[in-house]
Image (cartoon, rainbow, N blue to C red):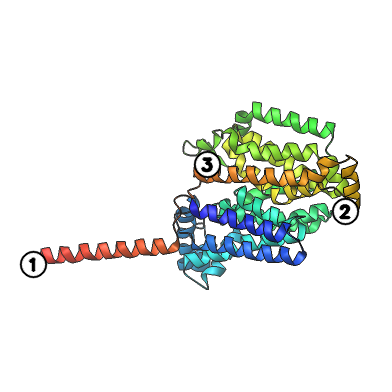
Amino acid sequence: MWAYAIVVFVVLLLGLFLGEWRPSRKKEILFLCLSSVVLIVFSALRATNVGIDYYQFYVPFFENVRSGGWSFLVSDANPYLTEFGFSLLTFLISLVTGNVFVYMAVIATIMIGLTAWVLYRDCSKPWIGMFIFVAFNFFGNTLSYIRQSLGIAIFLFAIHYIKEKRIVPYMLLVLLAATFHNSLLLMLPVYFLAQIAINRISLGVYGGMTILVLVFSWQIFNLVTQFVYQYYATDQNLYFMQGRDFMTGFIPVLAMVLMIAFQKLLLKKNPRNVVLVNIAMYAGIFFIFTWKHFLFQRIGNIFFTAAILYVPELLTALQATGTEEEKQRRFLAGKGSWRNYGYVYGIIAMIILGLIYYFWFIQQNRINLLPFYTVFDEIQVSALRVQATTTTFLNTLVQTFG
């Protein structure tokens, strides 16, 4: 646990120092560089036991690609044949190294580097976005859900083009993201849906659809699995249809409520923020579904990761506008005091809730983030195993031949 505590507090303290104290664009760049290095090094140095999918899926896959080469890549033996972007990336890395830790370091650099780029380009407060990336456990997901995390990083990069109403680059980026994880194909219609105005009619439609899905979820599941994703209907994978506890969906649903409640403020700041309000709403809806069926969380995570963009946008919208003289005059007149302090209160609430959510998630250990071991621990354990095996072999020889 101590390793994760160090990471989140380093990012938080760097953010407060470089992002809030005399902020500047240069300081934002410095913060993003420093925090990215911290996260990449942390990810690269973890042992293969950290992240439930790491040793179970990605270590053998990398070894198979390394030994089988291109023929394995294009064969039916490749479990990620339909996610060829990930397969190709693994193949290219395997041409340079056979070390799985270097492989994971390169992938971590791509995921975190692309996230930092998105924060620099699109986030109104990059330090808040990076803190949320860690505290809301999106970084933790990159330690296990590697393919989907790569796809999500590309999707985050593509959100900019929804706001710009540039359909071609958005669609191309989503199709690219889907070559890393097929679930990203669900983001194709988001280009159109995310531009719908949030009003009583649209909220009524979304609310009605949410109720219908909750009521008829098993019927929908049985219908869908007759044609696709049949493996979810097996006894082994039916645990995906179990519900998650309240805490799992609390933060995404709270963020949805706040984004809708303050949408007028957000749209006044930037009319294109309707995209972020919609995405926050989709995240909240899918996490409401998650309370009944865990399966929906994998989709909800795609939308919820965009919180690195929409939560900072909400917090900066709470800041009072105008010159310092105007702010002071309004404050002395007793007008808009909540706006003067809204940002500060929002930051404090975000930090407290973020840290609670972060340590709760780590402690749940749903994706084997604990215990945390480093590559050096794993090398030492491997050396001890070799030593023990050698000793046993020599003792057997001595006993056999006297």
User: Seen in the image, is 362 located left or right of residue 130?
Assistant: left
Q: Identify residue for label 1.
A: 402
Work out whether mark 1 precedes mark 2 in sequence or the reverse, and give the earlier one. 2
Question: Percent x, y for residue 400?
Answer: 11, 64
In the displayed structure, 305 sits above or below 78; it is above
Question: Which residue lies at the image location 73% right of the left edge and 57% below the top edge?
Answer: 20
Please say if the residues under marks 1 and 2 sit with CB atoms less than 8 Å apart. Answer: no
Q: Element under label 3?
A: helix
Give me the disc on residue 231. 3
Badge 3: residue crowd in 10 Å (few <14, some 14–19, many ≥20): few
**Which comes sooner in the sequence, label 1 or label 3?**
3
Spatial distance from mark 1 to mark 2, Cα to Cα?
90 Å
Q: Quadrant of residue 118?
A: bottom right
**Disc 1 vs disc 3: Cβ atoms closer than 8 Å?**
no
Residue contact between numbered discs 3 and 2, judged by CB atoms under 8 Å? no
Residue 210: x and y in percent read: 70, 31
| Callout 1 crowding tier (Cα within 10 Å): few <14, some 14–19, many ≥20 | few
Q: Nearer the viewer, residue 324 or 278?
A: 324
Label 1 vs label 2, nearer the camera: 2
Comes first in the chain, label 3 or label 2: 3
Q: CA distance from mark 3 to mark 2?
A: 60 Å
From the viewer's perspective, tell me whether residue 215 is left or right of residue 240.
Answer: right
Label 1 is placed on what type of residue? Gly
Q: Is residue 44 above or below residue 145?
A: below
The Cα atoms of the two marked residues, 1 and 3, are separated by 56 Å
Which quadrant is home to the C terminus?
bottom left
- The residue that label 2 is drawn on is 324
Give how far across and how far down residue 399 sits, in percent.
11, 63
Find numbered disc 2 in the image and state the secondary structure of the residue it sits on. Answer: helix
